[in-house]
Amino acid sequence: MPNESIFFARDLEYQETTIYEQTYPAFRFRDIFPVNNTGGEFITQISWRTFDRSGVAKVLSDYATDWPSVNLSARKEYAPVKKVGDSAKFSAQEVGAAQQNGVQLESKLLMEMRRAYEEKLDRIASAGDPSGLLGWNTNPYIPVATPTTSAGTGDDTWPNKTPDEILADVTLMMQAVIANTQGSHGSGAMVLILSPSRASYLRTARLSNTTGTLISFVRDAFPNLTIVEWQRMATATPAGGQRASMFEASPDVAEFREPSPFRILPLEKLPGGEVYQYLGRGFVGGLIVSKPLACVHLDGI
């Protein structure tokens, strides 16, 4: 057991029954990306194919022999599947002390194990992991657009821009997806990911000569667009700055792979005393982007 017990001796004194929990930023990756749980816990890697096509038809003369050919090429990609886990240890004495304080220690520890797992997956979904797992904000194939130029002091971040200029940035992202995919993406259900601070500009800023907020105008102009907040976007650029992202919300474009969801193994008693342990683990393949051109980042907002 660690030198520092979860419940100190003074916790046996009377105290308020309300438990004041530490608050954490919301782990939003499951709300943003489709999650794929197929595969099971025994697979070691995930593979997918990225297709590219070339060639276009032409007008032919009679007896022509120069018929143009079309080609379809495929590139096979791989991602490892890694085990992600944590544990919780406690003694019989700690359980008894906790009960006198009205705390169900085992339940609290099990919830903390799940929270720690979700936090790790949220980090992986954003930045990947050195073990080889892929992340949204570290994917090298997603195009990165440049924000529109501000008419202000030369600072192109959203706090320095007018609502019209921010609207131009959102429009630029939508047009980038359409242009990069030659119109095959961009008309479906789209997602705009922003940090909470940048989303607040959409909620509060008012367009010039109107009484409506910018977010209401964006929703009217792009009815297929859903705006979601993710704290990871506040430091998502390589330099640690603000980033906005847009993508078509389809598993064919991007999805988080979790072949085996989090499971807590049966309680075990550790040798040498009255100390017990829970182990919990899931198997994860990271954030896989199959069609990066249907996505776009906008850095420096």
Image (cartoon, rainbow, N blue to C red):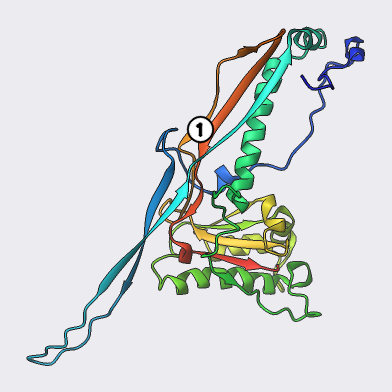
**Total residue callouts:** 1
Residue 177 visible in the shown view: yes
- 166 vs 82, left or right, is right
Q: Which residue is drawn at 60% across and 23% down?
A: 279
Q: State which quarter of the image contains the C terminus.
A: bottom right
Quadrant of the rendered image containing residue 155: bottom right
In the image, residue 107 sits, relative to residue 162, either above or below, namely: above
Q: State which quarter of the image contains the N terminus.
A: top right
In the image, residue 185 sits, relative to residue 81, either above or below, namely: below
Q: Residue at x 79, y 22 (%)?
A: 2
Q: Residue at x 70, y 19 (%)?
A: 89
Residue 265 percent location from the top left of the image: 55, 20
Per the image, the residue denoted by label 1 is 261
Residue 169 percent location from the top left of the image: 63, 71
Quadrant of the rendered image containing residue 276: top right
User: Foreground: 83 or 112?
Assistant: 83
The kind of residue tagged 1 is Pro
User: Foreground: 200 or 245?
Assistant: 245
Residue lying farthest to the front in this orientation: 272
Residue 104 visible in the shown view: no
User: Foreground: 228 or 279?
Assistant: 279
Helix, strand or loop status at disc 1: strand
Residue 134 percent location from the top left of the image: 54, 52
- Badge 1 density bin: few <14, some 14–19, many ≥20, Cα 10 Å: some
Residue 127 percent location from the top left of the image: 62, 53
